[in-house]
Image (cartoon, helix red, strand yellow):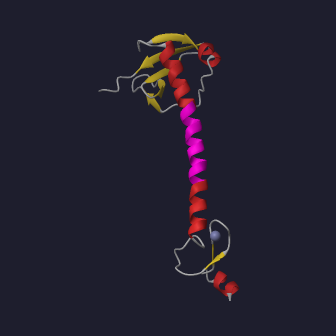
Amino acid sequence: MSLIMSRLGKFKKCDNCDQEIFGRSDKRFCGDQCRVSFNNLRNKLSARIIRKINKRLSHNYRILIELNPKGIAKKVKISTLNNAGFSFNYFTSIYITNESGNEYRYCYDHGYRILDDTWLLLVKSNMDS
Ligand SMILES: [Zn+2]
């Protein structure tokens, strides 16, 4: 019976424990306990990933603020950021200027543009406007 139902696409398994499910066709879990443990695990995993990324972003942000507290355009060595543990793969937005095509990478309102192998330019955007 279940083989025939499987061929017809009606045989379903619990997303949490793989047991066969009976009942409504939109059911995903065999019971409340499986639904709760599935969602708890998923939330735990996504919270961990979000925390990890937020940590890198806020670390980057603190470095940018420390190096440029006044928020003016300022040349800084790339190695200075590297030595402080800056993660260049983590940023919140990219801005490319129309005229020159220069790419600015931001962590929130603080950003930078890489000038060459040694230097970058720190900038701050006016988020109020
Ligand atoms: Zn289950």
Magenta part of the chain: 42-55
Residue drawn 56% across and 38% down?
51
**In magenta segment, residue 47:** yes
Q: Determine the quadrant in which ligand 1 lies.
A: bottom right
Q: Confirm whether residue 117 shows in the render.
A: no
**Quadrant location of residue 77?**
top right
Toward the viewer: 3 or 21?
A: 21
Q: Confirm whether residue 52 shows in the render.
A: yes
Residue drawn 52% across and 79% down?
24
Q: Is residue 19 left or right of residue 35?
A: right
Image position of 33 with respect to 50: above or below: below
Pick out the residue farthest to the bottom.
Answer: 1
Residue drawn 61% across and 17% down?
84
Pick out the residue farthest to the right.
Answer: 3
Number of marks drawn: 0
Q: x, y (%) of residue 38?
A: 60, 60
Residue drawn 41% across and 12% down?
70
